[in-house]
Amino acid sequence: MALSSKTKAVLLGPLNKNNPVIVQVLGICSALAVTSKLEPSIVMAVAVVLVTAFANVIISLLRKSIPNRIRIIVQLVVVASLVTIVSEVLKAFAYDVNKQLSVFVGLIVTNCILMGRLEAFALGNGPWPSFLDGIGNGLGYGWILVVVGFFRELLGSGTLLGYQVVPQALYDAGYENNGLMMLAPMAILLVACIIWIQRSRVKELQEETN
């Protein structure tokens, strides 16, 4: 099915020009906490995509019947239910990753990206646009996590997804893993580098900062 230009903007905008992490600076805490390895970064990204997309759809379907005074409570109930499902699935099929993610799966409930999309978009739009908005913002958040997790694990441990990728010959020649990559400040540095690269390439963002 062909997407209109408006629909494409809803889906693709968060991947670049309106990215929730590097443009709106939301969801930074989890981006720093779960990206020391690539696997939990990917799992967290997928979890946020699913929860954001389906929470948007559910709230969009209920938007005309939710009293304004309790809309936040309803949103929290919907999100908490979806997060509980995700958490139980992880415990059943990816227990080790669930342990690595620790409390941060539960904290999706209060993720400002998610709550912001429910308030700013799902309450005022239909289910299909809301679904695409959720997918777009989830992916916009997720690709940052994956990139940061990739470089932190590669440079910090010499592995990717737990598999050794730095040749032993390099270690024999004197190469050492950068232990600083395992610390949260290096995640901040990597996110800052992504912001710098993006703003150097996107003219609209340069004009906003000027």
Image (cartoon, helix red, strand yellow):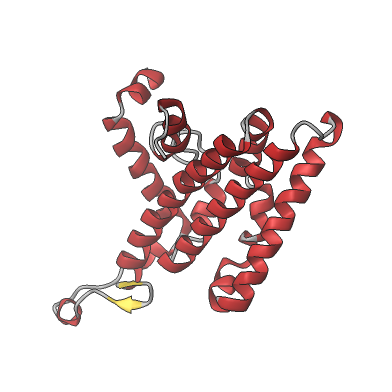
| Residue 107 located left or right of residue 202 | right
State the quadrant of the N terminus.
Answer: top left
Image position of 209 with respect to 45: above or below: above
| Residue 18 located left or right of residue 204 | right
Image position of 70 with respect to 163: above or below: above
Image position of 101 with respect to 2: above or below: below
Q: Is residue 26 visible?
A: no
Q: Which residue is at a point 37% across and 38% down the rendered structure image?
A: 195
In front here: 100 or 184? 100
Q: At which x and y percent is residue 178?
A: 32, 66
State the quadrant of the C terminus.
Answer: top left
| Residue 111 located left or right of residue 207 | right
Q: Which residue is at a point 38% across and 72% down the rendered structure image?
A: 161
In front here: 131 or 26? 131
Number of numbered discs visible in the structure rendering: 0
Toward which corner of the image does residue 147 lie, by quadrant? bottom left
Q: Is residue 134 visible?
A: yes
Image position of 40 with respect to 140: above or below: below
| Residue 205 located left or right of residue 117 | left
Q: At which x and y percent is residue 175?
A: 20, 73
In front here: 39 or 175? 39
Q: At which x and y percent is residue 184?
A: 47, 57
Q: Which residue is at a point 33% across and 31% down the rendered structure image?
A: 199
Toward which corner of the image does residue 112 lie, by quadrant? top right
In front here: 80 or 183? 80
